[in-house]
Amino acid sequence: MIVVLLILHGLLAVALLGAITHQALSVMTIAPAANSRWTFINRFRGVDATAYATPIVVLFAVTAIGGALLYPQYRIDVRPALEDTQNSAANGVFEIKEHLVAIGLGLLPAYWLFWRKRLGPETAATRRYLTWLLAFFVWWSFIVGHVLNDIRGLLPS
Amino acid sequence: MTGRLTIFSIMFGVIYLAAFYYDLALFRYYPEVGQFHFLRNDNLGVVILWYGWIATSALASAAIAFAVPKQMAERLWPGWAWIIPAAVVVGMLIYERRWFVS
């Protein structure tokens, strides 16, 4: 059961990572020139960012709930093993992950509000920076989650 | 309502930072025995405070958001919605340096 939940959590995280990265790049101020080549990056950025807001809120919340359900197993099995091997950096990056996810959960109402209400150019900067903050939280959590999941294979035996 | 949602998001991070720094978890979960407790109980194995910190932050920031007068909430500069959470993240990262220094 825990393995199924772990895989589901990972798959949801992949979807969230893709969505937030599309949106984060789409709100960059440097717009491609009208006559520039239609590169992969331009295509990646050229999405309707507003359409991503609600799916990102749902994916963030559901992925965080999945992580919260997995957390007891981590606390019982993984963290003591990291402490036994004096691997405080691994514990530290996970602590930061849990803080970022919690702060991100609290940020979701404002993020959703500023994307749902098209308040005009005066709130464009707020939308952009809220999106980049969430993107940083998601990327950090994704990388740390995967590294810690695989840490026994990554560390020298 | 829009201003109050923004205040909720701003205050959530601030209160979460205070909750984990001062150990203000609303409740504690002991995963080895599968029990929730309001009070500290060292005989039940390892403890998870994270759920309790989130609950503390959610309740306290919701209370503040509803306590702020609506007109004042609506006048809030939108930039605070990301500046204060970003400052909370910086503060948290500074505190968590402890894991990486010997």
Image (cartoon, coloured by chain):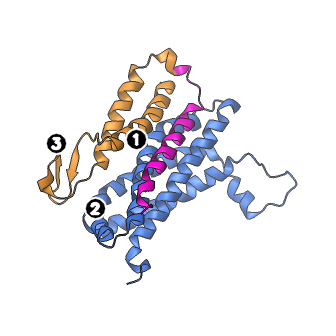
Chain colours: A blue, B orange
Residue type at the position of mark 3: Leu
Whether residue A74 sits left or right of residue B74 in the image: it is left
Residues tagged by mark 1 and mark 3 found on one chain of the structure: yes
Residue type at the position of mark 1: Leu
**Residue B79 counted in the magenta span:** yes
Mark whose residue sits in front, 1 or 2: 1
Instruction: Give the answer, above or below, for where B51 lies relative to B78.
Output: below
Instruction: Tell me the SS state at disc 1.
Output: helix
Q: Would you say the residues marked 1 and 3 are in contact, meaning their CB atoms lie under 8 Å apart? A: no
Task: State the quadrant of the N terminus of chain A.
Answer: bottom left
Spot the residue most to the left: B43
Q: What residue is at 68 percent from the left and 30 percent from the top?
A: A122
Instruction: Give the answer, above or below, for where A41 lies relative to B69.
Output: below
Q: What residue is at 35 percent from the left and 52 percent from the top?
A: A65
Q: Of residues B57 and A51, which is closer to you in this image?
A: B57
Spot the residue most to the right: A35
Subunit of label 3: B
- What residue does disc 3 label? B39
Subunit of label 2: A
By secondary structure, the bulk of the magenta-drawn segment is best described as helix
Task: Tell me which segment is drawn in magenta.
Answer: B74-102
Give coordinates of residue A136: x percent, y percent: 55, 53
- What residue does disc 2 label? A75
- N-term-proximal mark, 1 vs 3: 1
**Residue B100 counted in the magenta span:** yes
